[in-house]
Each structure stands twice: as C-alpha cells, then as structure tokens.
Image: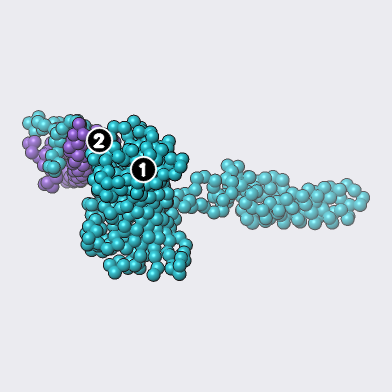
Amino acid sequence: MVNFFVEMQEKKIKEEKEKNMSEILEEVENYIIQLEKAVMKFGETMDDLRTLLNDINAIDSNSDLRKQWYKKNLQNEFNEIRNKIMPSRAIMEEKIQALKKFYEEHPDVISKLSNQSTTVTKWLKSLK
Amino acid sequence: MPKIQITFSRDFFNNETGAYANKTLVSDLDTVDALTAEYGNIYNVSVNYFNELKENTDTFTKLPDYDKTEISRGESYKVNPALSLPITYESFKDFLTANNIHNEKVQGLILIMLLQHRWGLPFAIGAGLNVFALYLTESVYESLTIGTNAQKTSLTFDEQGNAKFHIIFPVLVGSTMGQDTTTSSQCGHAETDIYLSPEGKINFSDITMSIEENEKKSLKEVKNKLDEMISLSNKFKENIQPKQEAPISKKSTNQFGNFLRNNPWKIAALAGSVILGGIGIALTLTGIFSPIGLAFTALSAIGVNFSLAGTSLLVANAAISASIGAIGVGIAKGVSQISASKPAPTASIEQPIVKQKKEPPVPLVEVGNILKKDGEEIHTYIVKPRPSNELLPSKQERRANQFIEVVNQVPNLPNVVNQGPSTSQRPSSTPTVNSQLSPTDEDSSGYKPKQQ
C-alpha cells in the first residue's frame, strides 16, 4: 500500500515536471520566434540604411553646392534613423545575451526544443 | 463645354508639402510608379534647396558653370521680348540691369528661379503638380500629367523693380506619362505667378489648373477621382474633430455639491422637509404650551406631515433607514447616503476625446462653387496643404518603427530551476549585430541581411 502511494506520488511529480517542461519549452520557443522576428526586422532596417549609405557615398565630396546640400539631407535622415533604432538594438542584443546565458545554464532545455529551424534556434543547435 | 478648375492655395507649395509629397509617395511605392517617387523627391529637394538658398544669398553669386550655360540653352529662356537670341549669362545680366535689377545676388536669384533643369523652380512646381495629377489618373495609358518640359515662363518688371514670373504648364493626357508632347494631347493648363521684390522677398500666387474634356480623358473620370479625394479628405477631417461626452458640467470632488447640482427635485423635497419640519415642531411646541394651542397644533400636524412627506421622498429614492424619528439627523444621513449610493452623472471637463487619426494618402481637397463664364460651367475645387505634423513616415522610418515594435514584443525567458551548466555544450561564439554604422563607415552585420 505504501509503495503504491509512493509510486503515485512519484508519478505525479514526474507528470508535474513534464508539464512544467512543456510550458517552459513553449515560452522559450515563443521567445526565440519573437527574437528572430526582431533580428529579421533589424536586418531589413540595416538594408535600408545601407541603401541610404550607398546614395550618400555616391555623391562626390567635390560636387557642387546643390549636391552637397542633398548629401547633407541624406546624412541627416540616415543619422535620425540610426539614432532611433539604437536603443532597440541594445535591447535586442541584451535578449540575445540572455538567450546565450539561458543556453549555458539549461542546455537540457535547449536540446528539447522542437526542430523549428529559426535562425536563432539554428545558431543555438549549431553550437553543439 | 464644362471645365474643371483646381486651385492650389499658395501655401500648398511649401517645405512641408514637399516633404509630404515625397514621404507619401515613398510610402506608396508598392502601388505607385517609381517615377512619381522621383517627382516627389525632386520637388522636395528643389523647393527645400531653394528656400535654404534664399536665407543665404551669398550662394547666388557663386553659380556653377552649368547654371550659366543653361540660360543659353535655347528659345525657352526667351522670357521677355527684350531678350534676343542667343542668350548668354552676360546678356541676361545686362537685361536685368536694364530693368533696374542691379544687385548681383538678386540677379543670381532670378536666374536660379528661371532655370528649367531639375534644380529650378518651374521643374519643381511642375513635379509637385504632377504628384497631384497622378492621383487623378486611372491608367498609365490615359495618364494626366504636367508637361514640365513644355512650360512657358515670362518675366516682366514694374517701375519699382519688382519682378513677376508667370509660368504656364500644359496639362497633358497620353500614354507616355505626358512627358512626350508629340504623342500626348493637351487637355488643359496650369498657371501661377511668382513675385520677387528688389530686396529678394518672394511671394507665390495660388496655382490654378484648368482641365477640359478630351477625347482621351473624360471630365467625368476626373470628377470621380476628385470626389474620391474629397471623400477621403472629409473622412480625415471628421476623424480629427474633437468628440465630447455629454452632458458636460463642471465636475466637483464634493459629493454633496454634485448631489445638489444634479438632483433639483430632491433638493426641493429636502428644503420643504426642513422648513415645514421646523415650523411643525415650533407649532407643536407652541400648541403644547400655549392656550391657543389647538389651532397651532393643527397647523403643526400639517407641518410635520409635510416634513415626513419630504423626508419619505428621500427615503424612497435612496433607501435611507431609521431616519424618520429625528428629522435633522435623518436629512443629513439621507443626503450623505443618497450621494454615496447614487453618484452624480460623470460629467467631465477633462480633455475631449480625439479619435485615432487615420490618414488618407492624398492632399486635402474641397469642392468649390460652380462658376459660369461666357455660358460655360466651371466646376471648381480647392487643394489645401496638409498640416506639417501630419507627415507620413518615410519607408525607412516605417521599417525602423516596425523593428522597434517587434523588439518590444520579445517576452522574457522563463525561470527554470538551475540544473548546472554543461561546459562541453557551451557556445563558442555569439551572433553579433554590427557595432558601428555611419555614413563614412562600413558596417559588418553578423546577420547578413540581403546583399545590395
């Protein structure tokens, strides 16, 4: 009888652990998916900035006043966008570092992630 | 034959409108031909540049060579009968001097205003009008455009040395975006006056665009398009109208004050209760201790009855218990309970609610009067500038905003009981985002966004 209760208790604990683990995995998956979206959006924003940078660099610094004026305007726009995204970029980097730390501390959790081939998951898996 | 006349108010062509035209078109790039974006950009750049130059007139004495040679390009610069071909930079300056324009900076300013290349005002204004004309276009085969290449400018002076520029643009309809005048037919014109004082002060007149029926372009189609824009403009205006909650009265934190203000009939009952109750008690006392008490006692009874009736109204309305015996206490208690149990309506003097604005990506258009001239009906419309604070974000800004929004949506990682790190599985590297990106530096994003 005692064994039965012990077994039941162990089974219950095991189920509880599994349940917790599935919730944790879900949260980690969600974290990675959202983080990947941020990374992709960051890449697109950087594409825009690169295009702008190319336009700026295409204007010769010896060109006339009007082109210099246009160049100055493009540079202002570039700087505004760059400054605007900087704080969010810092947050994104913090999130990446947090994920890295999480991976270091809980490799067992990462190993159980479903094989959704997001960029960040791929990166995590590739580190093994 | 009916006509359509569209008036662009003089402040339509200002810095903000230029920025608006540019930003709107850039944000609409998915649906609008890239050429229109170029127009918006040219307009923006030209007008802004021009306005900036105006503040620093020194630059007018340092004109680049291509400005000086541009004036001799052809007959289109014969802006006054007094000018004879071939026109040179020197002969043009002589012409200005002969018309009492002696200041070299103002001479340079006039030259820049006349230039027909991309940096000149006629091209910029034409490009701005083109942005609007494209909204009136259903298909590229019947596109309505402003023939900036075929614009005609005249320059005259009055005795005080004020210069007047009169610019006329043909409004074209055709399959080549209107720029090739040989395959497009004219269906109207746009014109404007620009005045320049000897001190260099510039005034713009309204710009009027007239459109007539054409075999390739029906006025009905143009009117339908204008109606669409008016509808969107009206929707935009409705959306920014303040919406107020009714009824509005001053809100007080004093519940008793609110009660008095919002329950007039209860106040009447209360007052009757107090007055008649007082009289009743006085009369009752008088009746007990006076030899003529009978009559007063009868009155007293009436007073008490009124008092009770008044109080009972309060009781009925607000469920006040145990207040009948002591009228004064009951009234005070009743008021307090009524106020607490049934608060005054939520009148507010706070800021009115303004609905979220949703901007239509079109200029603001209003319908004007129907004019009659020589038996002709002219349907008029007025185009107004959008407020400068209503500028749409550029494509790049929108992308940056999306990035910021997505970053804010990344949740926190869950808390997990630490089971100890596995040193063998530690990552050896971390993805990196580029650390530096400036107009002069190359960046090196670790995420390898698409290559240019």
Query: Which residue does the numbered mark 2 point to in the structure image?
Result: B64
* Closer-to-camera residue (A35/B198): B198
Is label 2 on the same chain as label 1? yes
Horizontally, residue B200 falls left or right of residue B315, namely left
Q: In the rendered view, would you say B370 is above or below B251?
A: below
Q: Give the drawing colour for chain A.
A: purple
Q: Nearer the viewer, residue B449 or B365?
A: B365
The quadrant holding residue B62 is top left
- The local secondary structure at tag 2 comes to loop
Q: Quadrant of residue B51?
A: top left
- Please tell me how crowded label 1 is: few (under 14), some (14-19), or many (20+) other residues with Cα within 10 Å: many
Question: In the image, is residue A50 above or below residue B281?
Answer: above
State which quadrant residue A13 falls in.
top left
Q: Nearer the viewer, residue B102 or B62?
A: B102
Pointer 1 residue: B15
Residue located at (26% from left, 34% from top)? A65
Residue B354 seen in this snapshot? yes
Helix, strand or loop for disc 1:
helix
Q: Chain under label 2?
A: B
B342 left or right of A42 in image:
right
Q: In the image, is residue B252 above or below residue B241?
A: above
Residue at coordinates 52% horizontally, 45% vertically from top-left?
B350
Image hue for chain B: cyan
Q: Residues within 10 Å of mark 2 (few under 14, many from 20)?
A: few
Q: Nearer the viewer, mark 2 or mark 1?
A: 2
Q: CA distance from mark 2 to mark 1?
A: 24 Å
Mark 2 belongs to which amino acid? Pro
Quadrant in which the C terminus of chain A appears: top left
Identity of the residue furthest to the right in this view: B291
| Image coordinates for residue B383, horizontal then vertical, percent | 40, 54
In this orientation, which residue lies closer to the viewer: B80 or B226?
B80
